[in-house]
Amino acid sequence: MDIILKYFSDFTAHQLDQLKTLESLYKEWNEKINVISRKDIDGLYEKHVLHSLSIAAAFEFQPGSEIIDLGTGGGFPGIALAIFFPEVKFHMVDSIAKKLKVTEAVAEGIGLKNITTQHTRVEKIMGRKFDFVVSRAVAPLKDLWRWSKPLLRKNMESGSNSELTTMKPGLICLKGGDLVSEIQESDTRPRIMEIHDIFPEEFFREKYILYVPR
């Protein structure tokens, strides 16, 4: 938890309680349904929560905006982002029901009111549009973009004058390693941000945020 407070200082008391409770909930549920590797569970706050919050450090989501978390697994990056942005709506999607069960239990355990879940394959989501798609290491960029593009609104619907209104709806994904060939194969031109520049911790070397605007 200390590593979160090293980089963020403006949480409310309620948000701090939610963040503190994550560890016990994930440890309890991980014993029943393994959604986080055994070696990573002790590094929950750095390897999962802070990693997810790198998106919050780089993007300011507007109140009322709608975001879909593709392949959320046990709830990352969506749960951490939903804590950080309580007035933003997060739709958490995964094709594996038992993983969503963990997401739902954790959200209920910390009193998160701004998430919904859906057990489905992303290709089967019809009739809904979102301002952003977020995802963490779920699939190659070309597949993420193919799935994301039909789900994205053409323009931001927020009336705010903040900097974000100049950004187009798009895919924001967390990736690691050498991405040259993956980006070439995707036929996209993402904006690439090095997470190590945001959080200069050894764990975040060669980890990136990719933003592909619609």
Image (tube, helix red, strand yellow):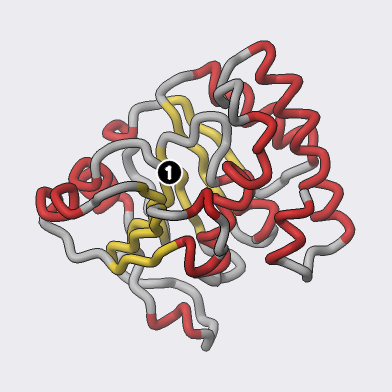
Amino acid carrying mark 1 in the image: Arg
Q: Position of residue 113 (x, y in %)?
A: 72, 46
Q: Is residue 150 visible?
A: no
Number of numbered labels in the structure image: 1
Determine which residue is flagged by label 1: 136
Which residue is nearer to you in this view: 69 or 2? Answer: 2
Picture layout, residue 139 above or below residue 30? below
The answer to whether 92 appears left or right of 185 in the picture is right
| Residue plotted at (68% across, 66% down) | 7
Residue 209 occupies quadrant: bottom left
Q: Nearer the viewer, residue 75 or 214?
A: 75
* Residue at x 64% of width, y 52% of height: 82
**Image-quadrant location for residue 89:** bottom right
Whether residue 65 is visible to the viewer of this picture, yes or no, is yes
Residue located at (36% from left, 47% from top): 176
Residue 120 percent across, percent down from the top left: 40, 26
Percent position of residue 141, x then y: 24, 47
Establish if 71 lies above or below 11: above
Q: Position of residue 45 (x, y in %)?
A: 68, 44
Q: In which quarter of the image is residue 183?
A: bottom left
Q: Which of 89 and 18 is in front in this view?
A: 18
* Residue at the right extreme, as displayed: 13
Q: Going by the image, does 64 lie left or right of 5?
A: left
Position of the C terminus by quadrant: bottom left
Extreme-top residue of the structure? 32
Secondary structure under the numbered disc 1 in the rendered image: strand
The answer to whether residue 91 is left or right of residue 141 is right
In the image, 28 versus 119, the foreground residue is: 28
Q: What residue appears at the point 52 percent right and 49 percent down from the top-left corner? A: 203
